Image: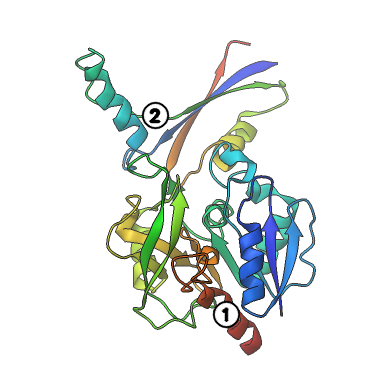
Amino acid sequence: MARVVVDVMPKPEILDPQGQAVARALPRLGFDGVSDVRQGKHFELEVDDSVDDETLARIAEGFLSNPVVEDFVVRRVQA
Amino acid sequence: MRIGAVTFPGTLDDSDTIRAIKASGAEAVALWHGDADLKGVDAVILPGGFSYGDYLRAGAIARFAPVMGEIIAAARGGLPVLGICNGFQVLCEAGLLPGALLRNAGLHFVCRDQWLKVENAGTAWTSRYDAGAEIIIPVKNMDGRYAAPRSVVDELEGEGRVVFRYAGLNPNGSTDDIAGISDPTGRIVGLMPHPEHAIDALTGPSDDGLGMFLSVLDSVVAA
């Protein structure tokens, strides 16, 4: 078994109103110096050793993200 | 004439869709997400709601339902398909229409009567309208902001595939005020606002939505 992390983020050119709302809230909470926030999704998958990188990429691209508007990164973390 | 309306877990507007189909004079056929069976219908409508709770992304899980395999194959073969709201999101996730629907720019769930301009009256679902007509039907969604790469939007605009455009206020920050689009054949159409809630002045802001249900009858007869 291995743990695989998939991070999905809106593409840079896509407006992210949720991230903007978070960024605008920070100064009101007294946190200064944060100029931008982008909000995405973080998936943690427990996978068998038989699942190869190509399969993981297909899962990330074909289901966990929508490639029209989102980018993804797949990482294997400590087993 | 048999028009199907699909129910997924979390679909909300199947009852009103069936009511609108009946009001158009067609026979309404309830289609179930778990049945890979279109029951011989002449056209299919994917109603609005929150299929599978909008988990992952709106429409992302519904596209894998058994009934969708049949709909995708039949749509590629020319079956008229209309996606309303969540149904539009499902059609985009399924790749039958380009682009995606994202969180409303204002981060509010928007529910109101909305003016639309009918930009293309040549599709299977809009032939009863005059090109350029303005209609008022309800819009109600959280994820209605149409987005696609600029090249895709330019292609849609150039080919007349922007079928509906928000008139007056844009409720969600949608690119180019796009409210609805079609595939290249004009037989697959998706829009965020809800024609099925505007078929009768007693229960909606107008009866402007009924034209979509009547239009497809003409297209099926002509086919």
Q: Which residue reaches farthest bottom? A: B222
Which labelled disc corresponds to residue B66?
none
Give the camera-side residue of B170 and A75.
B170
Residue type at the position of mark 2? Gln
Residue in view at x 56 percent, y 56 percent: B95
Which label sits on residue A39? 2
* Whole-percent x, y for residue A57 in the image: 57, 35
Mark 1 to mark 2 CA distance (whole Å): 43 Å
Q: Classify residue A13 as left or right of residue B144.
A: left
Q: Are marks 1 and 2 in contact (CB under 8 Å)?
A: no
Q: Quadrant of residue A51?
A: top right
Disc marking residue B214? 1
Q: How is the image coloured?
A: rainbow
**Quarter of the picture holding the N terminus of chain A:** top right
Can I make out residue B78 in this image? no
Question: Could you tell me the amino acid type at mark 1?
Answer: Leu
